[in-house]
Every structure is written in C-alpha cells, then in structure tokens.
Image (tube, rainbow, N blue to C red):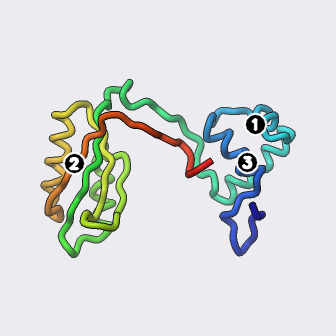
Amino acid sequence: MASPTPENPGLLDPLDAAILAVLVEDGRASYARIGARVNLSAPAVKRRVDRLLERGVIDAFTVRLDPATLGWGTEAFVEVHCTEQTSPARMRDTFESYPEVIAASSVTGDADAVLEVRAHDMRHLEQVVERIAAEPFVLRTRSTVVLNPLVRRPGPGPR
C-alpha cells in the first residue's frame, strides 16, 4: 500500500494496517504485544497509534458487548419508507432517540432508510416497530428478523 500523503491521508501503510488489525482483534493489547505481532518496538507502536489517533483513523477505544447476554437477544432489520420531503437529518434525529436502534442508514432502492434494531423479545420488537411506523414522516415499514448472525466483523472491511 502507498504511504499516506497530505493529498490522500486515508491511505495506510502496511505497518499501520497491521497495528489496526491487532487493535480490532483486541483493543486492550499492549504496545509491546502489538509490537511483537508486527515486528516493531513498543515505543514505535505507540508513536504510530498516536499518529492514527491524531489523523482520526482511530476515533475511540471501546469494548464489544454480547447483546444477548444483556437481554437484547432479538435483532431485526427494519426498512423505513418515508414521505418525499423527509430529510436524512430528520430521520437521523428521530432514529437516534430510539435506544433500540443500533444503526441507521439512508439507502438506495425502494426504502429510504434501513435500521438495525435490538429488542428484548418479539413483543418488544413489535412495540418498537409500531412506534417507528407511527412517526409522522413514515409511510410504512418492513421488518426482517435475524434468525442467526452468520458473519460479524468488528473492523472496517476486509483483512
């Protein structure tokens, strides 16, 4: 891969990409452990991680939770069809107010948005979808319940 440049700051060199792969796998990995995996010293890894933070490539260190163990075992994708004058900003502001909505995207195709929703059970999911459908700008919804997640990747894309 090419090195980052001021004209194209999004590019990662292979060492930065390798460091990110380790951090995606284990965000608590020490600089020494990362260094051992990518053949750099711990201080060199720290400098690179600091630069990745400064560039905004890394925007946070967090923890991944298993929603099912916390009582949020029902998951669905909800297509939302809106009135013509509904802006993405209005959709975002509305969907952000639902704690059950864990992701929302405007999309191409028939639907205007697709929501990823988590609920405690099917009754809870039904209540959430009914509340979303009752929003003044929503014409209709279509839900698809997840039976079993097949692939979940924590990183930004292919490794």
Image quarter for residue 29? top right
Reading the image, the residue beneath label 3 is 49
Q: Are marks 3 and 1 in contact (CB under 8 Å)?
A: yes
Please give the name of the residue rendered at 29% of the width and 71% of the height, measured from the top-left corner: 87
Disc 3 crowd, CA 10 A, few/some/many (<14, 14-19, 20+): some
Amino acid at circle 3? Val
Mark 1 or mark 2: which comes first in sequence? 1
Position of 127 with respect to 36 (left or right) is left
Reading the image, the residue beneath label 1 is 34
Image quarter for residue 71? top left
Between disc 1 and disc 2, the foreground one is 2
Q: Are marks 1 and 2 in contact (CB under 8 Å)?
A: no
Position of 153 with respect to 125 (left or right) is right
Q: Secondary structure at mark 2?
A: strand
Q: Secondary structure at mark 1?
A: helix
Q: Position of residue 101 (x, y in %)?
A: 31, 47
Please give the name of the residue rendered at 33% of the width and 67% of the height, measured from the top-left corner: 108
Q: Position of residue 17 (x, y in %)?
A: 70, 50
Please give the name of the residue rendered at 79% of the width and 44% of the height, measured from the top-left corner: 45
Q: Depth check: give the residue in front, 32 or 12.
A: 12
Measure how far apart labels 1 and 2 are at the Cα level. 42 Å
Residue 88 shows in the view:
yes
Please give the name of the residue rendered at 73% of the width and 33% of the height, measured from the top-left corner: 30
Q: Depth check: give the residue in front, 135 or 76.
A: 76
